[in-house]
Image: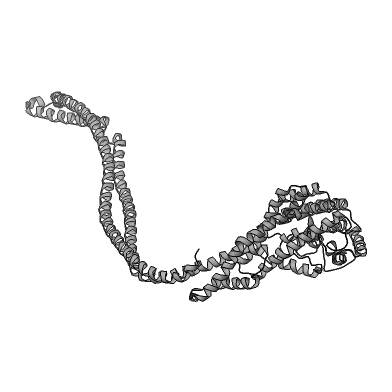
Amino acid sequence: MKVHSEDLTGNYYTEEKVLANQIATKLLSFGKKYIQSDYNENYDYIQKLKENAQFNSIPLPPDIAERFIFYENAPNYLIFDSPLISYLHKTFKVNHTMLGGNNPQLQLKEFYIKWLKQKKGTDTKYFANSMLHYLEKTKNNGFNLLIHAMLLSYDEGLFDPAKSIELINRASDLIFNKHIDNEYLNELKYFLKTIEGFFYLKGSNIDQSNKMFYEALDLKHTGITAKFHLALTEIELENLPLGISLVDEIYNTDIARLNFAIQNNSFSIYEFFLNHSITKYFFLEPKYFPVLHFFEDKLELFKSHNKASFNAVKSSLFNLQEIKVANYFTERIQANLKFIEIYVKKYTGNESLLLSDSSQEVVKKFDEIIEIISEQIKQKYSEGLNERLKIFDNKIEEIKTEKTHLENELESYHRRMNEKLKMRIVDFESQMDATINALENQVNNIDERNDLDPTVVFKNAFTYTSMLSVLVLLLAGFASYTNSEFKEMANFSNVVKTVIVEGAQWSLITFLVGTIISIFTTISTILHKSSYKQNMVRKVKNYIDEKEKGKIELRKETEFTIKQFEQKTKSRIQVFETEIADYLEKRQIEAERLQNEANGKIQLELQKLHGFYK
């Protein structure tokens, strides 16, 4: 339970009470001296609101951003501003700005706040009963069920933890029957499981409380609230090693928050987490007495090591102000120095363990200052070095540009020549295909040519033979008639007879000779046609072969031209590469000379910082 002033004073008549008083007093005394965990009974509701608002304004990393809830202070959380509570208000249409007959939320909030403000031991009956009156009207409101559950576990007059657990389970059912955004789903489960653990803890059901906190941590591994109270239950269950391990994790969370403030040079955040640590609650809960030795061991370490580091920072800060390096101070250095100066001035002689352990981050911050100054010194002289080397860099870039231009030109030439080759091949193929097609047409149409048709040739020859035979008949007949005696020709019939008989002999001879010639002519035509066709087919094949050879020759010609251009261009590129290598070598030599010159000046400046390096 939470330590109250009245618990630490008064008369105790039993040995058990005297021992409990001694334990609580020893814890509180240690915490007050070394953790700044003094109990302040005047720390009122308004101050708690301000503390909550300040915490919510700090942009902590997610793993250390949880708002810690001490189980004795859990009722306050439902009235504090937080993203989770605001989401529950929105989900259940909780309106705290307008009061109406169907909206008793504002009045409920006012009574809840007045109930919270009442000091321990005062009469809260009126405010509690007034809230019950309003809660009866909103049984289906998940948020109001949480208020009701808190009331039954934290009001002495209505104390009923079992009923609180029943109510929070009903609230969980109502909440998760709603559509819950993924952003809040896991956080809500963690919150409700942790609060349920509080109710079991208030009812002294340590085993069940322990189980709830384990389940909460399964939902959120960095859950600092569940982790704190899990440690409490483990200690009560006499599992001290695990309890101490959890206490160490919680303590390290406080250190991480303080380190965050130091890293961001925020003294206000540092003071906030120093004064509102989670660790201080170990000393406000007497059940944590078994882990006191854990902090006593840390105190010994503080005396032997951390205190020495803190003093070293003070000494280094003084020495840094004595040497002349202010011209190297950046905005970051000035911010670091300002923080360290305030830190040293404010906390010299402070015995806080949290301050002691977080001071290691201040030491790192001072080391960062020295490192930045060192880099500034090196940069100052390096910038001049680079400026003097630009003459080489510019020349190298100029040659690289020309080299790149040649490489692009070579690539472009390859592309142009290949395109030209494609066009030449297309033209050549078109010409050859036209010739081949013409020859193939002649072969295909050979049967349609009369001069190569044996039948036509024979008919023509036979016709000529017949006509010639008739002509020979007449000529030979009239010739015979002319040579005959006149008296024999006196008779017309004799004339006809003479012409026909005499001419028929020669006509028959002529016809026989002509027929033989016609037959030979026909045979010759058949042979010529076959020979002609074979010659044409051979010619087509030759043209096809010539086409392929022509394409190969065109490619060879193009490849030869490209190769000549490529050799010429690569030779020029090689010249540029040689020039670049020469300039790089000259630059390296000059850079080494200038660097040696700069190093001498840098070493003179760095000697001022010699005493600050470890």
So how many labels did they put on this image?
0
Applied colour scheme: one colour
Is the N terminus in the top left, top right, bottom left or bottom right quadrant?
bottom right
Please indicate whether residue 60 sits to the left or right of residue 540 in the image.
Answer: right
Is 539 drawn above or below residue 76 in the view shown? above
Left or right, residue 36 beside residue 593? right
- Picture coordinates of residue 354, whole percent (x, y): 67, 62
Task: Tell whether 186 sits left or right of 413.
Answer: right
Residue at (73% x, 68% y) in the render: 53
- Which residue is at the front of the view, 117 or 599? 599
* Image location of residue 210, percent across then percent down: 77, 48
Q: Quadrant of residue 607?
A: bottom left
Among the 4 quarters of the image, the one containing residue 386:
bottom left
Q: Nearer the viewer, residue 545 or 203?
A: 203
Above/below status of 265 relative to 239: below
Residue 613 visible in the shown view: yes
In the rendered image, residue 183, in percent from the top left (x then y), is placed at: 70, 56
Indicate whether 293 appears above or below 366. above
Determine if residue 178 is in view.
no
